[in-house]
Image (spheres, grey):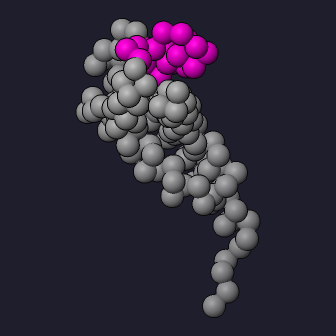
Amino acid sequence: MLYRLAADALVLFHLAFILFVLFGALLVLRWRGLVWLHLPAVAWGLAVEFLQLQCPLTRWENCLRQAAGQGGYDGGFIEYYLIPIIYPAGLTAQLQWVLGAVVLVVNGLAYWRVLVSRRAGKAAAGPSRP
C-alpha cells in the first residue's frame, strides 16, 4: 500500500514538473527569481524530448509499482486520468520533437516578454547615477 501511494505521489509530482517545464516561464513573469529553477527544468525537459532519454522519475515510479505488486497502470483515479497525459499512447520520436518544439516556443515567448518588460523597466527608471 505504501509503495502504491508513493508511486501515485510520484506521478503527481511528474505531472507538476511537466507543467512547470511547459508553463513555468509564465510564473517567471511574476516572480523573476524563479528563473533559476525554471531554466534547468526546461533544459532537462528538452533533453528528455530531443534526445529521447528516459526520465528517472519514470524508472523510479515503475520500481515503486513493481514493489507494490502492480503490473500496470489500470485502476484508480491517478492511473486512469493522469498516466495517459504523462505517457500518451503512440508517442513517437517525431512527436517528441514536436513536443520539444512546443516547449521551446511557449517558453521562448514568455522569456521574450520577461526581457522586454525588464528593458522597459530600466528605460523608465532613466539613466543610472554614478
Residue drawn at x 44%, y 43% as measured from the top left: 42
Image height of 37 relative to 50, above or below = below
Q: Position of residue 2 (x, y in %)?
A: 52, 33
User: Which quadrant, please, contains the C terminus?
Assistant: bottom right
Q: Position of residue 109 (x, y in %)?
A: 55, 39
Q: Nearer the viewer, residue 127 or 23?
A: 23
The region drawn magenta spans: 70-88
Is 72 part of what is drawn in magenta?
yes
- Residue 58: which quarter of the image? top left
Residue drawn at x 51%, y 54% as measured from the top left: 37
Drawn side of residue 34 relative to residue 88, left or right: right
Is 3 part of what is drawn in magenta?
no
Total marks in image: 0
Q: Nearer the viewer, residue 27 or 126?
A: 27
Residue drawn at x 63%, y 42% as measured from the top left: 26
Drawn side of residue 114 relative to residue 72, left or right: right
* Residue 38 appears in the figure: yes
Q: Position of residue 49 (x, y in %)?
A: 34, 30
Drawn side of residue 116 relative to residue 73, left or right: right
Drawn side of residue 16 relative to residue 41, left or right: right
Q: Nearer the viewer, residue 62 or 84?
A: 62
Q: Position of residue 84 (x, y in %)?
A: 49, 14
Residue drawn at x 36%, y 24% as measured from the top left: 66
Q: Residue furthest right?
A: 124
Image height of 41 relative to 118, above or below = above
Image height of 109 relative to 130, above or below = above
